[in-house]
Amino acid sequence: MTARTTTRPFTRLSALALALLAFVPLHGVHAQSHGGHDEHGHAHQHQENPPAKPESPPKAPATDVDHSKMDHSGMDHSTMDHSGIDHSKHASPDASQPKTPIPPITDADRAAANRPLRHTMSHGSSLHRFYRVDRLEAWDADHGTGLHWEAEAWIGTDTDRLWIRSAGEREAGETHAADLELLYGRSISAWWDVVAGVRHDFKPGDSRSFAAVGVMGLAPQKFEVEATFYAGEGGQTALVLEAERELLLTNRLILQPSIEVELHGRTKVERGIGSGLGGIEAGLRLRYEITRRFAPYVGIVHERSVGRTADLQREEGEGTEETRAVIGMRVWF
């Protein structure tokens, strides 16, 4: 009875001791395990290795920015983008841009490029001369062959010239119109001359003289223009306007349209001239230049009298318009 009682407490104590002995090693091993973890993750002050560099805090996730609510007035947009970083010092050179910047075009540059043509001749004073029969043409009229001529000549320098011009018309062996002009011409620009002098009319009617002043030259679109004002005895005045243009069809074949208009200040019954617009002549001539100095041509010419001049011609039993085919030549030397 006594032995059983003593053995049970001993047995219990032995079991408790064994349990304690078993617990102590397990706790030490567990502590060593935690110490090794701290050596890599959370360092303590008694460790010999230097503390590791702390990691930067995690970045916040990117969110969309509403630029409409941001104030960009203080930002230099020429060198900075919307992030505020200056890229002008780091931008690589653009191969398409010139190394030397080209300055902007100014009004002075435009004026220099479109400078008006100035007539600054510095030619010598040597004399030159020129003669031309511009039109010598014939046609078949009702009372025989008709003949018309226009000729001009000049002598002088490049800026000062003495001009002689003549025009007239014959039909059936009778002269119906003839005049001669003696003019002094002065060049006022690269393309225009001013002329002044006298004109003498032999026909129609009695011969008489006029003072003449006008301009002649090359207008835009290559129109050759002559405008001459005449003032004669008894207050008689007239203005003659002529224009023509040469259209080059080939190197030798040239089409030349022309128009001439006459206006008169007063009515002269004895000369068959009425005041106002008196006559219009339009022509179309096609010439072939065998050489530059000689060119035959064919053409068609239409003449018409209007206004008071037409009334005077009707009273004399004459027609007021005529259309004719002409053949002629142009010569200069």
Image (cartoon, rainbow, N blue to C red):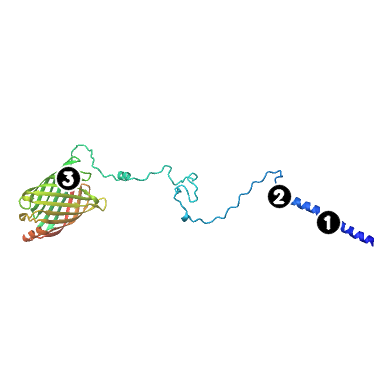
How far, Cα to Cα, is label 2 from label 1? Answer: 29 Å
Front residue of this view, candidates 27 and 115: 27
Numbered label attached to residue 38:
2
User: CB of mark 1 within 8 Å of CB of mark 3?
Assistant: no
How far, Cα to Cα, is label 2 from label 3? Answer: 114 Å
Secondary-structure class at tag 3: strand
Specify the quadrant that holds the N terminus. Answer: bottom right
User: Could you tell which of marks 1 and 3 lies nearer the N-terminus?
Assistant: 1
User: Residue type at mark 2?
Assistant: Asp
Identify which residue is drawn at 10% across, 57% down: 144
Q: Is residue 151 left or right of residue 22?
A: left
User: Residue type at mark 1?
Assistant: Ala
Q: Residue under circle 3?
A: 194
Q: Position of residue 164 (x, y in %)?
A: 13, 45
Specify the quadrant that holds the C terminus. Answer: top left
Of tags 1 and 3, the one toward the viewer is 1
Front residue of this view, candidates 330 and 209: 209
Q: Residue under circle 1?
A: 19
Residue neighbourhood size for the residue with mark 1, other residues' Cα within 10 Å, grouped as few (<14), some (14–19), many (≥20): few
User: Could you tell which of marks 2 and 1 lies nearer the N-terminus?
Assistant: 1
